[in-house]
Amino acid sequence: MSPRAAVLYVCVDRGRQASDVPAERAIEEGRAFADGRGMPLLETITDPYGEPDPRRRKGWQRVCEMAVRGEITDVVTRWPAAVAPESHHHLRFREAEALGEHGVTIRYSWEPLAELKAAAP
């Protein structure tokens, strides 16, 4: 593994018109974020929006498997709700802590959050 290696995780609500625009924007933004910070993206992993518990999502399970195997140092996602919605925000902390045990940090690509890293309470 290179010094930094990341996956781009995308789980967005497609909205009322079932548009792909939110996912496309998240992918574009995430790639620019990683590129601007010298983080090679190994993979883009997506999940359909709707399941609040990330551990029940196939894509998130893949993210966690890559973390356990030491393949990644960062998970880039647009904002905290991609990991878990506001109604289940405590799950974000659980996931940040679990990934952190493997040296992996969740990073947000949305500009107002871009310098934040997810942290366990």
Image (spheres, rainbow, N blue to C red):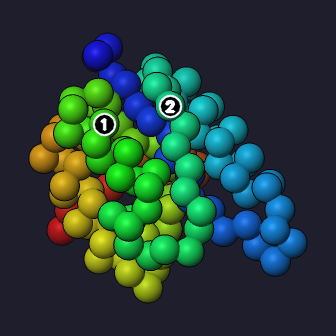
Q: Is residue 28 above or below residue 91?
A: above
Identified by mark 2, the residue type is Glu
Tag 2 secondary structure = strand
Element on which disc 1 rests: helix
Residue assigned mark 2: 43
Which residue lies under the disc numbered 1?
66
Quadrant in the rendering for residue 57: bottom left
How crowded is the residue under tag 1: few (<14 C-alpha within 10 Å), some, or many (20+)? some
Q: Would residue 62 appear left or right of 101 to someone viewing this image?
A: right
Q: Is residue 28 left or right of residue 79?
A: right
Residue at the outermost right position: 17
Q: At x 86% / y 72%, what residue is drawn? A: 17
Whether residue 60 sits left or right of residue 3 in the image: it is right
- Answer with mark 1 or mark 2, whichever residue precedes in sequence: 2
Residue at 46% from the left image edge and 51% from the top image edge: 59
Q: Residues within 10 Å of mark 2 (few under 14, many from 20)?
A: few
| Residue 121 picture quarter | bottom left
Residue 72: image location, x then y, percent: 31, 31
Residue furthest to the top: 2
Q: Position of residue 28 (x, y in %)?
A: 69, 38
* 82 to 41, vertically: above or below: below
Q: Nearer the viewer, residue 112 or 57?
A: 57
